[in-house]
Amino acid sequence: MQCPTCGSPYESGQGFCGSCGGQLPTEVPPTQVMPVIEDAAPVEPSAPQASDAQAEYDREYARYQQEYAAWQAGQAQPQAAPQYPATYPAPGAPIVAAPAKKSKTGLIIALVVGAFVLLGVAIAALALLGVFTFSTSVKSATTEVSEAPVETTAPSGFDTAEAAIKAKLPEYGADWVYTVYEESPTDVTFWVGPPASEYAAAVTVSKAADGSWSVTAEEALDFASDVPGGGNVEMSSAEEAAAVLSDHLYAVMEDRGMDAHALTVEPFANDGASAGEADGQFKSFTIDGTTEQSDGSFWVKSTQVWTWGTEKWQYWLVPTEAGYRIADMKEW
């Protein structure tokens, strides 16, 4: 007998073709007439036999073979081996449960943790490198600064002529004193020298365009060309009185009221003007002359420029154990 589907021979009693898997015709045995048995008990249907389950499996498998044959015929290229759908096992292969899929959660967590650890190590390394680099640069900069030569310059650009001469005096001597020798709105010449001694030098302080005062000239007074008669010049009583008044007026101009008051005696010491402070309104002054009295005192004239105008005052300076001091003042 031959398979009606592919023509392959098969034996009697075979349910499916061994070549194509198609279902073979079922041989129907000739009908037999069963004898009728009267008064016989009804026959109960028997329980399904094990052969019924096998037959059901064979039918399902035959259907699968047909579907597979149709699928294989539609492929563009022949396959090296049949790739069976996961729904059906290969013929004769044992049915084995598919292994459970392994979870990747643990691996992902491990990778994330590892990435953070590496990131932390990298940040720490960069921070250490940055600190080291910064420290090195600071140390280098500090070394360069410390090795650079320190340049010093003499003080200059003072608010007043007196401040400029006071800054200059230490170059001559720590205890040297000064007095105004000649003065104009833009230049003041001071004589300077040791205390209770002859003056030794003339220092000129000039006013710049910005209003600041600086030393512009210095001359020694020990040459014949400097002072008529030659030699060092001792401060006269008139010059000493003029110098005390100059100190007093500078103290008022610079708002040093106590210093101004220290150069006065009664009755002027009891006047508030003896410790006056100009509060920026006293701009400049000149010493215009001295007049000696029979008792050794002097009237010293001064022209003063204030914000409201020019005033002329003369001061009475009397000799004391501490030197000349201002005892009175009046207009002239």
Image (tube, grey):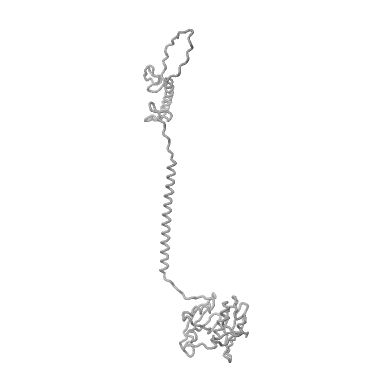
Left or right position of 331 against 111: right
Q: What residue is rendered at 43% in x and 42% in y?
A: 106
In the image, residue 42 above or below residue 102 = above
Q: Nearer the viewer, residue 98 or 308?
A: 98
Left or right position of 245 against 6: right
The quadrant in which residue 183 appears is bottom right
How many tags in the picture?
0
Percent across and percent down for residue 42 are 49, 12
Left or right position of 276 against 118: right
Outermost residue on the bottom side: it is 294
Percent across and percent down for residue 193 are 48, 84
Left or right position of 94 against 281: left
Percent across and percent down for residue 105 are 44, 41
Percent across and percent down for residue 227 are 49, 88
Check the picture and name the quadrant holding the C terminus. bottom right
In the image, residue 11 above or below residue 212 = above
Check the picture and name the quadrant holding the N terminus. top left
Q: What residue is rendered at 50% in x and 88% in y?
A: 234
